Image: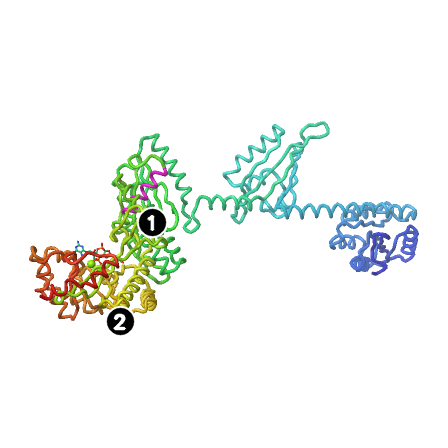
Amino acid sequence: MNPREATDAQPLVLVADDDSATRFLIHKALEQAGLSVLDAENGAQALTLFEAHRPHIVLLDVMMPQMDGFAACAAIRRLPRGATVPILMLTGLDDLDSIKRAYEAGATDFAAKPINWLVLSHRVRYLLRMGRVLEDLAASEARLAAAQRIAHLGNWEWNLRTDAWYWSDELYRLLGYQPREIMPGIERFLERLHPEDREAVAQIIECSRREQGAYGVEFRVRLPDGAVRYLHAQGEVVGDERGDPAKLSGTIQDVSARKQAEDQISFLENYDKLTGLPNRVRFKERLDQALATAKRQTQKLAVLVLDLDRFKRVNDTMGHSLGDRLVQAVAKRIEACVSEDSPPRVGAFARLGGDEFSLLLPDLKHPADAAAVSRRILEALSKPFRLEAQEVFITASVGIGRYPEDGSDCEALLKNADTAMYHAKGAGGNGYRLYDHSMNAAAFERLTLENGLRRALERGEFLLYYQPQIEIQSGAIAGAEALLRWRHPELGLVPPDRFIPLAEETGLILPIGEWVLRTACAQALAWRRAGLPPVRVAVNLSARQFRDETLAESIAQALRLAELDPQGLGLEITESVIMQNASGTVNTLQELKRMGLSISVDDFGTGYSSLSYLKRFPIDVLKIDRSFVRDLATNPDDAAIASAIIAMAKSLKLDTVAEGVETEEQLAILRQYGCRLVQGFLFSKALPAEEFEVLLREQKWRRAASE
Ligand code: C2E
Ligand code: MG
Ligand code: MG
């Protein structure tokens, strides 16, 4: 370390005087007093030495060449450590003008020449002590300012007698000023306050001043750039020695971060993040309020629950992020549609979760108004949505619950609107339903079935029954249709018509369908292994399965598992499913066909397809729907249709099966038309596998039919 560098142990004095004799004498006197001394011949040199050695005190002669003492003093004051260092000016005796100028230049004190050496060293010591105190004070002020900056905390004082104000630097910043930019004062403070908070805060301050009480208040300030900051102020009255109120003093802290967190929490509790709409909690609150008003003023109101149809499919095929975007787009569209002026007024619009929304119509004049809103929304949704260059079509189902007819509290109204919504869905979707009391039983059954259906597979409650298909000419059993049965633990044997639509809607049809395929394949192989005559087992495919991309793969797997020749398996697909997406269907059918499977069009005649249209599809068999067979003997129209179907099928080289043959008469007509296969109660209903096996062994119709 440089021995001339200032140390705490031995304070360093910088002496600047152009007179070498004076310099020498000062030097000696101070050294004798135990101080280290640096000499400079003029102001400029003093400045250089000050920067290099950082002395604890500076003695400056007034008159010096190059740079005089005043200029040197002012220059030191501008240096980083120079602001607080004690500077003693050596002036001529009675030179009042110099003394005045010395103070103006920032000198701490002066000593008049000629110098009293004894007094000088004492004075230097005294100034050194004062310098240390000042330095400590400056350091502690800096620490306080830093602490305030970190804590976003400012403090202030208001002298009630002189009306003088003090603001800390941080307080200036909190209020959006530069430190010391302006004279602090109550007007300058109130000026920054948010207009809505100004009056209240002014009153609190005034009140605290009058009543000498403490206060705490939260308010907003508006910064020059328009940003809003939340501040918390605390203050109290400080009394003088006699206890009379002298000052008001306090702190102001920036609580914007806390406020933001609070807002965030309240947002999360009450709003849906995806759409920004109120959530279920908030909706219920609003509904409760509206119900209270409606009860007081004997008004009516309605709750609408809206759910997107087959939204799960959108999610499955397009991915969840696009699914989310669709939900957002739907929310926007509904919002735009209900914010039109046309009555009735919509009191709240919320997202209940997933793809489910709800609306509140307070003060409903007429139930038709709720229906009108529903229609308007459905209409708005019917236009395609554009998502990432894709056009998406979506429909929705709406259920309406009304107060007072359908319930008097929030829970009941929402539940019943929900039930009505499910009925709208059950009717095919893209529609609305007003709740009525008969809906509850159906909803209950649906719920029971749906819950049961989820467990039925695991619990082995499904069975396959087999119904024979007989060749009219020979009477031989040529095939079997596998028909699904559900043995419900409480409801008994549930027919497929009651649970297949539900399984389709919930997506459970996929695992169930796979089970059907595997079981049917295994059964076909078992009969073959048992040496029974070969029969083709036909399995029904639902629309959902048919659209499933993994269909071909899971069929191939079922065949592999059972080591079954594809010839042994047939697939039945209804006419309407085939027609739904004609171009996609051709591809799927071709793929299945290439695998060697036989494909039947089920329930043929109930759709709108012309036979020639069917030519485009690679199919093998037409199954004439039961409704044409039923009145074959009595209704000439049906007979004509059946006859035409069979004739045209023949020309297209398609096989025909007539379904639901119950009488000899029907059979005779079908034989006459040239239908090859029949299936119906006349021969047998669908039977458990063991009983079907008996039929296979007996072949009891063989001879009889060929006679
Ligand atoms: P479907 O494919 O048209 O099956 C023929 C239906 O007609 C069967 O009803 C059968 O029992 C019935 N039936 C047969 N002969 C006669 C008759 O002479 N008179 C009358 N009145 N009915 C007759 P089931 O078993 O109740 O099946 C109903 C529908 O459920 C089936 O119609 C089919 O669409 C569907 N289904 C059955 N099993 C499955 C399956 O494993 N998967 C799928 N996706 N759907 C299935
Ligand atoms: Mg069928
Ligand atoms: Mg059928």
Magenta span has 420?
A: yes
Residue 297: image location, x then y, percent: 33, 30
Seen in the image, is 658 located left or right of residue 239? left
In this picture, which residue range is highlighted in magenta? 410-423
Circle number at residue 596:
2
Label 1: state its secondary structure: helix
Q: Which residue is mark 1?
A: 452
Three-letter code for the amino acid on which mark 1 is drawn? Gly
Percent from the top left, x then y, of residue 292? 37, 33
Residue 21 image label: none
Can you see residue 66? no
Query: Mostly what secondary structure, the magenta segment?
Result: helix
Residue kind at label 2, given as amino acid type = Gly
Q: CA distance from mark 1 to mark 2?
A: 36 Å
Q: Does the stretch in magenta take in 99?
A: no
**Percent position of residue 388, x then y:** 37, 61
Q: Residue at x 14, y 62 (%)?
A: 701
Of residues 632 and 419, the one nearer the viewer is: 632
In the figure, is residue 572 to the left or right of 162?
Answer: left
Question: In front: 302, or 246?
Answer: 302
Residue 383 % position (x, y): 29, 55
Q: SS at mark 2?
A: loop
State if disc 2 and disc 1 touch (CB < 8 Å). no
- Quarter residue 78 falls in: bottom right
Figure check: 322 above or below 185? below
